[in-house]
Each structure stands twice: as C-alpha cells, then as structure tokens.
Amino acid sequence: MPPIVSINDLVKTYPGGTRALDGISLDIQRGEFVVLIGLSGSGKSTLLRCINRLVDPTSGTILFDGIDVTTADRAAIRRVRRRIGMIFQQFNLVRRTSVFSNVLSGRLGYRSTWRTIASRPTSSDVAAAFENLGRVGIADRAFSRADALSGGQQQRVGIARALMQKPEVMLADEPVASLDPATSHSVMKYLEEINKKDHITVVCSLHFLSLARRYGTRVVALKAGQVAFDGKPAEIDERRFKEIYGEDAEEVEIGPDRPQPQPLAADGAEQVDPSR
C-alpha cells in the first residue's frame, strides 16, 4: 500500500536565510503514530506545517494520498486540508465563544458559504460536535466559553474540533508543551485512541523522549533541518540520544507523579516566519 504522506528532498528557507528544513525525505504509512523529536529550531513545526501547506516549502515535494501538495492550487489545498486535522500547542481556539462553536468550526471546510455566514449548522454537524466532545470527556462544558476551561480541557476541545473533519491524518504540533505531566498523558491518550480505534495516522511533535517512547510507533528525530534518526522508539539508546541532543544533554522523564521538568529542547521558539 502506498504511503499516506510521501516527502521528498523537502527544503524550507525563511526570509533572512534561516534554513529550517534541509532536504527531508520521509514516507509515512497509514496507521502509524509518528513522533517528531529534536531541539527547538530543528524543523519540527515547519515540517508539520508544510504537510498541510500552512507553510510553503522552498523546494521538494510532498504527496498526500498521491496528491502533490506543493503544487496544488487553492481549491485543491482546501480539499486536502479537509482530510488533515491539526492540533496546535496554544490551542488556537476562539476564546470568547463557546466550546460548541469552536468544535463546529472544524466543519468549515465542508459547509456552504451561506451556512458559514448565517451560522446555521446542520443537524448532523450538531450531533457530531456533541459526539466528539463526549469522546474527549467534556460534553458537559459545550456551552462554556473556551477561555473558562483549563489548558488541558482547551486542548481536548482542539482534538474534538479536528475530529469534526473526519481526518485521515492528524498533525499535532507540540500539543502538550504547555501542560503539566498528568494532563500531558491524558491528552496523549486521546491521540493514541484515535490512532488505534479510528485508524487515523498521527504525526506529533514532542519535546519529551519518554512520551515519544510511550506513545509513538515510530520516532523521527530532526537536527538542523535534517533527519538524524528514523526508527522504533526503543532503538534510541544513549549513543543515539547524544547524537540527537548533544553530548551535554541529559534525558528527562515525564510522568503523572513527577514535577514538570525542563524540556530537552533549548529555550525559545523554533526559528520560523513570524507570520505563520
């Protein structure tokens, strides 16, 4: 079976000369749970955002289910994005509106223009919104304002919103970076469930190697915009770890009973176009 995502020699150089991706080639198979790891600035976010063309690559190709995303026009990209869910580190919710409205926005790519303008969801969309909120355990907060929820609850809203698309691939960009250890595991378990039960391919960037080992079926490590490791989580031994993170790095663990450690990555955001 052909891969759901095929990336070949992908390069992204931002204005100013920052080369975020430097010749990435990867095939992602249907049903995988791929975890991207690496220091901040290694290219994780940029790679995820190139897959659904939130960021335009400089060169190279990305095929999604045989469709060349890198050359697709706006209409084709819109159709592709319907099939690719996205979960963000900072949740990207409309904070002053209800949880229910935020989840319904996951159907915007399918709704007609007049329904979008009139805010008239179909009965099937309403039913799906409550079903997906139920799946992540917050149906009782459907009519609360999004900014009244905790960080973990807001991220669950983000997952429910992405599920509204009925995606074939779920991209998660540092989905637990701002959450405490126990909440991090809670969110990761929802991603694990949709991967295993719904057979949705997941590509998720993480800072913590312990989470990557626990939830990933495959780990891809990036270093300076290139693939430094691609294999099973258990194959990352101490030597591999030092190659990815540097000789002075120390592995940290994250668990429900542990205080929040500093991430393996250096402080600071990835060097990317600020307008992304």
Image (cartoon, rainbow, N blue to C red):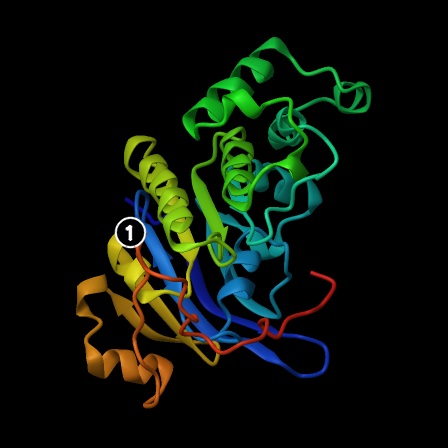
When the figure is inspected, residue 256 is found, relative to residue 209, above or below; the finding is above
The reply, left or right, for residue 7 in relation to residue 243 is right
> Which residue, given by chain and number where applicable, does mark 1 sit on?
215
Residue type pointed to by label 1: Tyr
Q: Give coordinates of residue 227: x percent, y percent.
A: 38, 74
When the figure is inspected, residue 276 is found, relative to residue 123, above or below; the finding is below
* Closer-to-camera residue (94/140): 140
Residue at the (36%, 58%) spot, across then down: 35
The reply, left or right, for residue 83 in relation to residue 110 is left
Q: Give coordinates of residue 156: x percent, y percent.
A: 49, 37
Quadrant of the rendering where the C terminus is positioned: bottom right
When the figure is inspected, residue 57 is found, relative to residue 145, above or below; the finding is below
Q: Give coordinates of residue 154: x percent, y percent.
A: 56, 40
Quadrant of the rendering where the N terminus is positioned: top left
* Closer-to-camera residue (87/259): 259
Residue at the (56%, 50%) spot, across then down: 88
The reply, left or right, for residue 89 in relation to residue 35 is right
Residue at the (34%, 80%) spot, across then down: 244
Examine the rendering and report whether any part of residue 232 can be seen. no
Examine the rendering and report whether any part of residue 49 can be seen. yes
Is disc 1 surrounded by few (<14), some (14 to 19) or many (20+) residues within 10 Å? some
